[in-house]
Amino acid sequence: MQMIDRPVVALVVAAGSGSRLGGEVPKALVQIDGRPLVRWSVEAMVAGGCQRVVVVVAAPLVDDFRAALAGVSVPLQIVVGGARRQDSVANGLAAAGEQGIVLVHDAARPFVPVDVVRSVHEAVAQGAACVIPVVPVIDSIRRARGVSSHVVDRSELVAVQTPQGFDLATLRESHEQAALQGLEVTDDAAVCEAAGHPVLLVAGAREAMKVTEPFDIHVANAIATQRRQMAANAFQENP
Ligand code: C5P
């Protein structure tokens, strides 16, 4: 039987307020080693094999994002987001096409490695409805209730990253169902799971950290500088 490749579209959500980062520039437009954070995230999706990108942004910033993303090498559409992350994803899905594979990615994760992006959409291409990258939890964890707390076995826990990959029609239907049920979620795997679809875990990477607090900007700049130096060294060895 001939396998027909399904198109892979990236839906990059960047409409959050970024209030935990502080500062005057919106988080996704903060410069990391001379490039806006959202541009790193979009380029990561393209490098990982996405053929089209939809970027979801806050209404007053459409022109700023258009400038930040000028010249990206695949077709790119900018749409306006909503009050909650799930509203922003729903708006993006309306522009993502009918059929195929969709990778929903937080703009706040600029350095997700190419291997992670590929493994997510390849698992969807092989038939999974919902695929998420995860990393082990490294800190000890306690559940806190007021002044009392108790330990939680971290060996059973994983931290969830993005991009999360889905069959596009399945994610759209799941979001419609979630809206009807008034479901509140923090990611799209939860939307699919609530609609009865199994969630497949694949290995994520520490580099796919979410830039959230001011400290994370220092880490992001260090990663970007290291990547630039590695690229320069590789060029010197093989001009
Ligand atoms: O707030 P949180 O860390 O969950 O945000 C994750 C991603 O979702 C960020 O890239 C943020 O810009 C995006 N987001 C969005 N629309 C919202 C809230 C968050 O696109 N209303």
Image: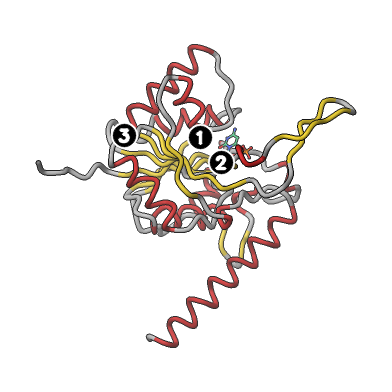
Q: Mark 2 and mark 3: span between their CA atoms?
A: 26 Å
Q: Nearer the viewer, residue 209 or 87?
A: 209
Disc 2, ligand 1: is the CB inside 8 Å?
Answer: no
Up the image or down, 42 lies above or below 17; here it is: below
Q: Are marks 3 and 1 in contact (CB under 8 Å)?
A: no
Q: Quadrant of ligand 1?
A: top right
Q: Mark 3 and mark 1: span between their CA atoms?
A: 16 Å
Q: Which residue is mark 2?
A: 160
Which quadrant of the structure image shows residue 175? Answer: top left
Closer to the chain start, of discs 2 and 3, is 3
Q: Which residue is mark 3?
A: 97
Q: Which x, y percent locates residue 171?
A: 39, 28
Up the image or down, 101 lies above or below 110; here it is: above
At x 29% / y 36%, what residue is drawn? 127
Q: Which x, y percent locates residue 81?
A: 53, 33
Q: Are marks 2 and 3 in contact (CB under 8 Å)?
A: no
